[in-house]
Image (cartoon, helix red, strand yellow):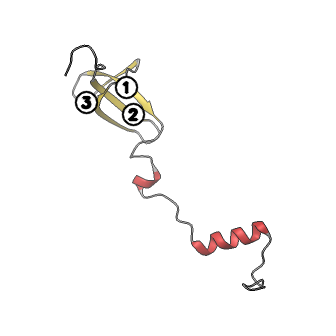
Amino acid sequence: MKNGIHPDYHPVVFRDASAGFAFLTRSTATPTTTIDWTDGETYPVLDVEVSSASHPFYTGTARVLDTAGRVEKFNRRYGRSSHEGAGS
């Protein structure tokens, strides 16, 4: 690597406060607050809104809406009734 052209790459803790989840990794982010980590060291901490611990896709809490329900909702919203069949 060329000297002087790359950003500082250092350990940073990413914390998802809504899920009580944090992990230590390396990043170029420069947070202003710090946290005492489990290894006894102090690291900068960056609070995030969503992580793998709180995102519905990763936690398995995503809602699945059935297709029939979507069709009925569409028909109610836009005025088609179920007795108006195709070809009318």
Look at the numbered discs 2 and 1 and tell me whether their residues touch, using CB distance below 8 Å: yes
Mark 2 surroundings within 10 Å by alpha-carbon count, few (fewer than 14), some (14 through 19), many (20 or more): many
Q: Is residue 83 left or right of residue 2?
A: right
Mark 3 or 2: in front is 2
- The spot of residue 67 in percent (x, y) is 58, 72
- The residue located at (41%, 54%) in the rendering is 59
Label 1: which secondary element? strand
Quarter of the image for the N terminus: give it. Answer: top left
Residue located farthest toward the top when viewing the structure as drawn: 4
Tell which tag, 1 or 3, sits nearer the viewer. Answer: 1
Distance from label 3 to label 2 (Cα)? 14 Å
Left or right, 25 with reference to 74: left
Quick one: SS at disc 3? loop
Residue 78 image position (x, y, % from top left): 77, 67
In the image, residue 46 sits, relative to residue 86, either above or below, namely: above
Q: How many marks?
A: 3
Comes first in the chain, label 2 or label 1: 2
User: What residue is shown at x 48% (from left), y 37% (from top)?
Assistant: 49
- Say which residue label 1 marks: 45
Q: Residues within 10 Å of mark 3 (few under 14, many from 20)?
A: few
Q: Residue at x 57, y 71 (%)?
A: 66
Q: CA distance from mark 2 to mark 1?
A: 7 Å
Pointer 2: what residue? 15
The label shown at residue 38 is 3
Q: What x and y, as percent, mark residue 87?
A: 74, 86
Q: Name which residue type carries label 3.
A: Thr
